[in-house]
C-alpha cells in the first residue's frame, strides 16, 4: 500500500491557499490602510508647516516687542509645535509669560502676570508691550 502516490484531499486545498495570497490578504484593505497612513502623515506635516509659518510670521511682525521683552529680562522659549512664540520670566516677584499667538483665530498676544491673564490684539512695538507689563 503506497499512500505517497495517492494525494490526500486536504493537501490539495493547503497548496492552493499557499499559492494564492489573495485568499487571505485583501488588496483593497491594504490599499485603504496605506492611504489612511499616508493621509495621516500628510496632515501631520501640513499642521507642522502651518505652525512654523505662523511662528516665522509672528517673529517678524512682533520683532520690536520680542526684543523689548528680552531687554526686560524675559527669555524666549524654544519653538514648539504650536503656532506661537513665548517669552517667560519674572518682573519683580510676579511670574510673567508673554505669548504671541497665531492660528485659525488670527494673531493675538496673551499676557499672564501672576494670576492675571489678558488677551489683546497682536503687540508689535516696545511701547505697547510696556503698557501691558506696567504694574
Image (tube, helix red, strand yellow):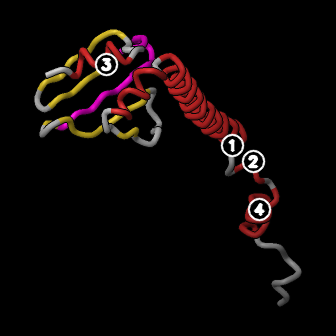
Numbered circle sitting on residue 22: 2
Position of residue 86 in the picture relative to residue 33 (left or right)? left
Answer with the quarter of the image where residue 93 lies: top left
Q: CA distance from mark 4 to mark 3?
A: 72 Å
Badge 3: how crowded within 10 Å, few (<14), some, or many (20+)?
Answer: many
Q: Are marks 4 and 1 in contact (CB under 8 Å)?
A: no
Badge 1: how crowded within 10 Å, few (<14), some, or many (20+)?
Answer: few
**Residue located beneath label 3 in the image:** 129
**Residue located beneath label 1 in the image:** 26
Decide which of 27, 47 is in the foreground and name it. 47
| Secondary structure state at the residue bearing disc 1 | loop
**Residue located beneath label 4 in the image:** 18
Numbered range of the magenta stretch? 95-108
Q: CA distance from mark 2 to mark 3?
A: 66 Å
Labels 3 and 1: the sequence-earlier one: 1
Q: Residue 47: x and y, percent?
A: 54, 28
Decide which of 17, 21 is in the foreground and name it. 21
Q: Are marks 1 and 2 in contact (CB under 8 Å)?
A: yes
Q: Residue 44: x and y, percent?
A: 55, 34
Mark 3 or 1: the one toward you: 3
Residue at the spot 64% in from the left edge and 39% down from the top edge: 29
Tell whether position 19 is magenta: no
| Secondary structure state at the residue bearing disc 2 | helix
Labels 4 and 1: the sequence-earlier one: 4
Q: Are marks 3 and 1 in contact (CB under 8 Å)?
A: no
Tell whether position 106 is magenta: yes
Amino acid at each position: 500500500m503506497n499512500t505517497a502516490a495517492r494525494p490526500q484531499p486536504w493537501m490539495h486545498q493547503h497548496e492552493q491557499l499557499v499559492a494564492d495570497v489573495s485568499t487571505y490578504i485583501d488588496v483593497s484593505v491594504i490599499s485603504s490602510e496605506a492611504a489612511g497612513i499616508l493621509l495621516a502623515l500628510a496632515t501631520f506635516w501640513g499642521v507642522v508647516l502651518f505652525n512654523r509659518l505662523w511662528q516665522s510670521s509672528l517673529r517678524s511682525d512682533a520683532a520690536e516687542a520680542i526684543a523689548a521683552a528680552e531687554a526686560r529680562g524675559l527669555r524666549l522659549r524654544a519653538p514648539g509645535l504650536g503656532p506661537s512664540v513665548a517669552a517667560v520670566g519674572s518682573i519683580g516677584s510676579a511670574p510673567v509669560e508673554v505669548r504671541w499667538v497665531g492660528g485659525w483665530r488670527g494673531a493675538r498676544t496673551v499676557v499672564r502676570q501672576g494670576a492675571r491673564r489678558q488677551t489683546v490684539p497682536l503687540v508689535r512695538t516696545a511701547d505697547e508691550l510696556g503698557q501691558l507689563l506696567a504694574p
